Image (spheres, grey):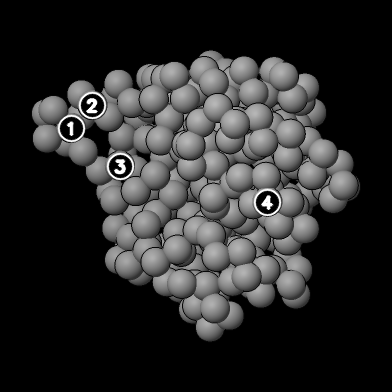
Amino acid sequence: MGIVNVTPDSFSDGGRFLDAVAAVAHARRLIAEGADALDIGGESTRPGAEPADEAEEIARVVPVIEAVRRESDIPISVDTMKPAVARAAVAAGATMWNDVTALGWSPDSLATAAALGRKVVLMHMQGEPRTMQKQPRYDDVVAEVAAFLKARAEAAITAGVAREWIWVDPGFGFGKTRAHNLALIRGLPQIAALGFPVVVGVSRKSLIAKIARDGSAADQRLGGSIALALAAAKAGAAMLRVHDVAQARQALAIAAAIGDA
């Protein structure tokens, strides 16, 4: 899943693709590199991020989704917590709703997902983007994340979302310390055992610089991104959300050839 951030402040590429023309060109590159899907978002959810206005978020993502859809039938995910943005994105051609709040941001979220009849990604986050990295705590991070995702999936099914449309994401870096993130990588089989396809987003995360202790900037974390992606794939991830599609596909192909993914 190739990442298209149509935002001014995303942690890795904020501002680079805020212009719709640049965002569509980036989407084309990701498709050419072999992306199986695109994830298009108009609001940053990096630690400390400020929320975007609903109308502005729609104005950012809809023209990009429409342009990509005119050129390609690739699955398109909209990365948003807002039901109104999800509705606008699906009307423009999106086929999946990726929600960092697991359909918990609005009282209308669950009903909207059911009415849209599209795939949904339910992600775990402790807290909210502005405060999530301020002393996150768990007794057992893997068990607690798994229990949360199971509960949210059951809530979605009860609301009318088809079970086969539900994907889950443990939310690496969303209210987790270095130790929590590493425990979740090791514990991914427990998340996959819930019976839903697992999405993993570890690309360019600050976790990499913390492990390597090298102070690397976001765009200098390719090696760590690939290492984490391979570990996630081996542990049962069904979809990897990445910035560097060509490099990730190459690494996965080699790992598969030697029987390690």
At a point 64% along the width and 23% down the height, the residue shown is 24
Q: What number is the disc on residue 96?
A: none
Sequence-wise first label, 1 or 3? 3
Q: Between tags 4 and 2, which lies in front?
A: 4
Sequence-wise first label, 4 or 2? 4
On screen, residue 80 versus residue 201, left or right, reads right
At a point 29% along the width and 51% down the height, the residue shown is 236
- Pick the residue in front: 137 or 57: 57
Sequence-wise first label, 1 or 4? 4
Q: Between tags 1 and 4, which lies in front?
A: 4
At a point 20% along the width and 24% down the height, the residue shown is 254
Q: What number is the disc on residue 91?
A: 4
Regarding mark 1 in the picture, which secondary structure is present there?
Answer: helix
> CA–CA distance between discs 4 and 2?
35 Å
Which residue in the structure is indicated by mark 2?
A: 253
> CA–CA distance between discs 3 and 4?
32 Å
> CA–CA distance between discs 1 and 4?
37 Å
Quarter the C terminus occupies: top left
Q: Are marks 1 and 2 in contact (CB under 8 Å)?
A: yes
> CA–CA distance between discs 1 and 3?
10 Å
Which residue in the structure is indicated by mark 3?
A: 233
Regarding mark 4 in the picture, which secondary structure is present there?
Answer: helix
Q: Are marks 3 and 4 in contact (CB under 8 Å)?
A: no
Assess disc 4: are there few (<14), some (14-19) or many (≥20) residues with their C-alpha within 10 Å of its C-alpha: some
Q: Amino acid at mark 3?
A: Ala
Which residue in the structure is indicated by mark 1?
A: 256
